[in-house]
Amino acid sequence: MTLPPLGKADFFALSEFRYQMRRFERFSETAVQAEGITPLQYLLMLHIKGFPGREWATIGELAEKLQAQQHGVVALVSRCEAAGLVQRRDSVEDRRRVEVHLLPAGETILTRLADVHRAELVALQGKFTVPVLLPSGDHHE
C-alpha cells in the first residue's frame, strides 16, 4: 500500500506536535534543574516509581524505558546513588539480578516534580495532541 504524499496540513500538524513536545520538555528541564537534579535523573526515578507491579526496576528495564545503553544507565544509577536518590540491592529471588530502588530523598523530589508536571499537562490539554495525518483526498492547503 502506497501512502499519499503529505499535504501542508500534515506538515503543520507534525510541526505543531514537535513544538508542543519540545515546549513540554523545556518546561520539564527547567523544573527538574530547579530541584538540583538532571532531566535523566528525574526520568530514571520516574521509571522506577512507575514500573508496573513493583517498587523497583532492573538496569535492563530502565535502559529500555530510557532508550539508552545499559552501561550509560549503570553510570546514571551510580550518580543517583551518590546523590542519595536511589539504591541498588541484590535480588533475594535471583542473585544475578540487581534491583534499583528509590530512597526517601528521591521519592520526595520525584513527588514534587510529578505534581508540577501534572499541573503543566492539565494546562496543555487540548493543545498537546497526537497529530492525525489525513488520508488521501483529505489534504487541505
Image (cartoon, rainbow, N blue to C red):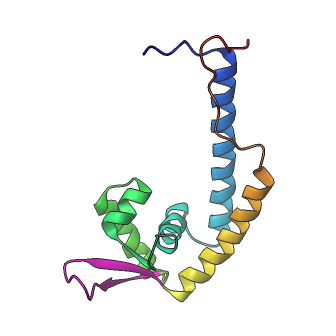
Up the image or down, 3 lies above or below 130; here it is above
Up the image or down, 46 lies above or below 104; here it is above
Q: Where is residue 3 drawn, in percent x and y?
A: 49, 16
Query: Is 53 on the left-hand or right-hand side of 125?
Result: left
Residue shown at the point (37%, 75%) measured from the top left: 78
Query: In the image shown, does 41 or 21 lie closer to the viewer?
Result: 21
Residue shown at the point (46%, 72%) measured from the top left: 48
Occupied quadrant, residue 65: bottom left
Q: Where is residue 76 drawn, in percent x and y?
A: 40, 68
The reply to whether the magenta stretch includes residue 115 is no
* Bounds of the magenta segment: 86-102
Up the image or down, 139 lies above or below 37; here it is above
Query: In the image shown, does 8 or 81 lie closer to the viewer?
Result: 8
Residue shown at the point (34%, 79%) measured from the top left: 99
Query: In the image shown, does 4 or 65 lie closer to the viewer?
Result: 4
* The C terminus sits in image quarter: top right
Taking the view exactly as shown, the residue that stands out farthest to the left is 96
Q: Where is residue 25 drawn, in percent x and y?
A: 63, 51
